[in-house]
Image: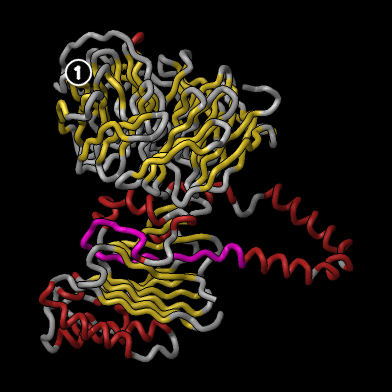
Amino acid sequence: MRKTCFLCYGNNKDKETFTYSEDPTNLRGEEFFVFFSPPRKESEAAIRKLFRSAIEASRLGDPVHYFQKVIESFRTSVDNLEIDEDIPAESMVVIMIRRERDAYLLCSKGVEILYHDSEKNIEGPVGILHGVKETGPGDRYPQAELFEKNVADYFRIYRFKIPDGCHSLVFAPSREFIGQNIEMLRDNLFFPSTIPENTDMLSFGTDQTFPVMHWDIEKKAKKTAVKQKIRRKSMIRSRAPYITGGIAIIVAIFFIFDPFDISEKNDDIQSKGLLAVQDDDIGETEGGSTKTETTGSDTDKKPPVSEKSPTIVRETKQGELKEAWKEKFESPVTSSPSVLDGQIVFGCRDAFIYSYGTEGTFKWKYKAEGGVGSSPLFSGSRVIGADYAGNIVCLESSSGNMSWIYRGKEKIITTPRLMGDMVIVGTMEGNLISLDIKDGKRIWAEKLGNEIWASPAVSGECIIAGTTDGSLVRLSKTGKIEWRVKPGGGIYSSPLPRGDIDLVFFGSDDKYVYAYSISKGNLMWRFPGGSKMRGKPETDGKNLYIGSEDGMLYAISFAGELVWKADLQGAVRSKPLILDDMIVVTAYNSKTYVLNTGTGKVIFEYDVESPVYSSPATDGSKIFFGSNQGYLHAVSIGRGAL
């Protein structure tokens, strides 16, 4: 039974790369995968020869010995002047040998390996994979014998055991490639329900071909555990008195001395993750009249902040959140639902915008030209949505029929905003654009930065938007930039303006929550969090609520003082939902929480089948949100809590 699979992505995977694989015929058989990608067209013939020699070389014995043969073939080619000496360093080489659970990898040094554990939401360099060992194979050769540099400057060897669960390894051409395509990788590769069976299911829009390794053996591991439990049942019964006494002693020692310090190890692993951000959020921001004074100055002030407050201890009552209904889709539902008059609209990464009744009745669906991570927005009898292909569409809310479409070329993940008779949308190329709501014609566009992930906000007669390169920008209704500041980190958290107190709130990748003056662009205060602050802020009129990447939910006063914080043990990238004296939060640890807004105490919690980006919405009787495994959930709170 195959435990792993390799897939290759990129527009040139069938043109300029060489791939070979052998699947094991039985559980103890060997799995073999070879991927060579030449750096230049003129080196293709030489790389093809090296590729063939790698396939034909004997793999008997230690896999590391086989890897040395492959390296030797590169050395020989250089010595014989068949290829330029830079070719080994510039080529992308990935070879894997797996024997049962032992996996061996040979990679050219330029390959950047990104690891993802879908169960625990651990993501980062391959080094965070438990038990992985990295070596440089250069010890076998003197430096003068192989190229002009030591062989370790060209290749790396990794060895690890295949663990249970759903995991992925992306072998990227470079670190820059990961940075430019990380959102795309997360969208398409890191959720168990979306691992494709063939490479035709995904289009990555890049000429750089790269392989991805997947494995998922959770079910087999569980079945084995059950069988072992049954086989040992009689043995356990016969030895129960002795085992019970031994366990009691061990448990006592464990809790007295805590020899393994488990909590610290888990925290350390989580802190190394390169976690995704929420694509979208919902709801109109509160606004008021503001002055239109222009100032472009940044500030490095450090206003007083509250550093200390106890973390709330969770006393959760299970079972109070109850499933009303749920609907399964083919792709993740990271779009946040919008609810109006008994109707829900939301996007799905299967390239549809869907409409359901709040009781679960299907109404209509609209076929977009790309995945939909943006949250649709109700505007009277219309729905405004956007897709990954860069299109913005206006639909009739009753039928889903299209009223107009704006065909852009820049990917959109932000939620559209309304400003009078204009629709405001940010794009992944860093542009903020304005459309006429009547016909979808563009009114203006303004380049603000590298990318706009955070949904823009409207406050009175101004627009406020953040960029991933760290700019917070205020624009007039005509698109004129009125001020720009750079707080100190990338902005993935959607700004929340409060015109009545002249403040706009947002989180930043420098681990702070900021409050700036809407009118002047001055820093009023900043609050330190424990990790990147990528959650979307919300307020109940008394406090600000925002989640962080380390799983903390913070309640902060409008003066920047900590009221409370609650450890939800899973990254919070969604926008909280306020329900009277309760706050509903979805998290990336596959849970939804209901907390008391005054104390931060977790009242109820609800288990979901997968991590959640989607922000919750409500119709007054149920809570709605999507999941990364492709469900739209409708959840009721028991005992008339709503």
Point out residue 547 in the picture as x, y percentages from the top left corner.
46, 32
Point out residue 308 in the picture as x, y percentages from the top left corner.
50, 25
Report the coloring of the rendering: secondary structure
Q: How many marks?
A: 1
- Is 325 positioned to the left or the right of 193 in the image? right
Q: Is residue 287 visible?
A: yes
Point out residue 553 in the picture as x, y percentages from the top left corner.
50, 31
Q: Is residue 507 visible?
A: no
Taking the spot 40% from the left edge, 32% from the top edge, the residue there is 281
- Is 360 positioned to the left or the right of 135 in the image? right
Taking the spot 49% from the left edge, 40% from the top edge, the residue there is 626
Pick the residue in front: 612 or 387: 387
Quadrant for the C terminus in the image: top right
Point out residue 400 in the picture as x, y percentages from the top left corner.
38, 35
Quadrant position of residue 239: bottom right
Quadrant position of residue 312: top right
Image: 177 above or below 439 = below
Image: 198 above or below 245 = below
Dot 1 falls on a residue whose secondary structure is loop
- Dot 1: few (<14), some (14–19), or many (≥20) neighbours within 10 Å? some
Taking the spot 38% from the left edge, 86% from the top edge, the residue there is 65
Residue 206: within the magenta? yes
Q: Which residues are magenta?
A: 200-220
Quadrant for the N terminus in the image: bottom right
Pick the residue in front: 347 or 511: 347
Pick the residue in front: 479 or 317: 479
Please state which amino acid type lies under the numbered disc 1.
Lys
Quadrant position of residue 593: top right
The residue beneath circle 1 is: 477
Taking the spot 48% from the left edge, 17% from the top edge, the residue there is 540
Residue 295: within the magenta? no
